[in-house]
């Protein structure tokens, strides 16, 4: 599949609750690894795209999933996205 999702990441306000919920729901294997002053939880689904769970880096912001997509050329992909989705008056 072109431009496959290669990593998904949850930035959450409650890491423990997210780990308990998603770990049980999807039977994920979760592994905590040190990351700077905190911890990053690696999500190992067994097959398919893996990811991670971490404390949201922006205090007060809601929890959100981020999806990372593989591209061959980031500059070309960014230019294409701008041409396709950004209204003319907002283009750089």
Image (cartoon, rainbow, N blue to C red):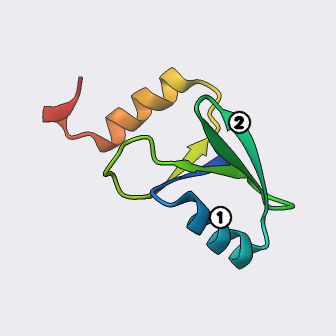
Q: Position of residue 34 (x, y in %)?
A: 71, 36
Q: Nearer the viewer, residue 15 or 45?
A: 15
| x and y percentages locating residue 28 in the rendered image | 78, 66
**Residue at horizontal 62%, vertical 33%?**
71
Q: Residues within 10 Å of mark 1 (few under 14, many from 20)?
A: some
Q: Is residue 66 above or below residue 38?
A: below
Location of mark 1 (residue): 19
Q: Is residue 39 left or right of residue 83?
A: right
**Residue 4 showing in the rendered view:** no
**Label 2 belongs to which residue?**
34
Instruction: Please state which of residues 15 and 62 is positioned toward the viewer in this rendering.
Output: 15
Mark 2 / mark 1, whichever is N-terminal = 1
Q: Quadrant of residue 62?
A: bottom left
Q: Position of residue 32 (x, y in %)?
A: 74, 48
Label 2: which secondary element:
strand
Q: Determine the residue positioned at 59% across, 24% down.
A: 73
Is 32 placed left or right of 59 in the picture? right
Q: Residue furthest left?
A: 89
Q: Position of residue 17 (x, y in %)?
A: 57, 68
């Amino acid at each position: 599949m072109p431009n496959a999702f290669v990593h998904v990441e949850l930035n959450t306000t409650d890491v423990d609750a997210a780990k308990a919920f998603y770990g049980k729901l999807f039977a994920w294997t979760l592994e905590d690894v040190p990351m700077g002053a905190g911890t990053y939880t690696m999500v190992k689904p067994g097959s398919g795209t893996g990811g991670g769970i971490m404390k949201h880096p922006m205090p007060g912001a809601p929890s959100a999933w981020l999806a990372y997509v593989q591209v061959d050329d980031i500059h070309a992909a960014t230019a294409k996205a701008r041409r396709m989705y950004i209204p003319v008056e907002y283009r750089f």
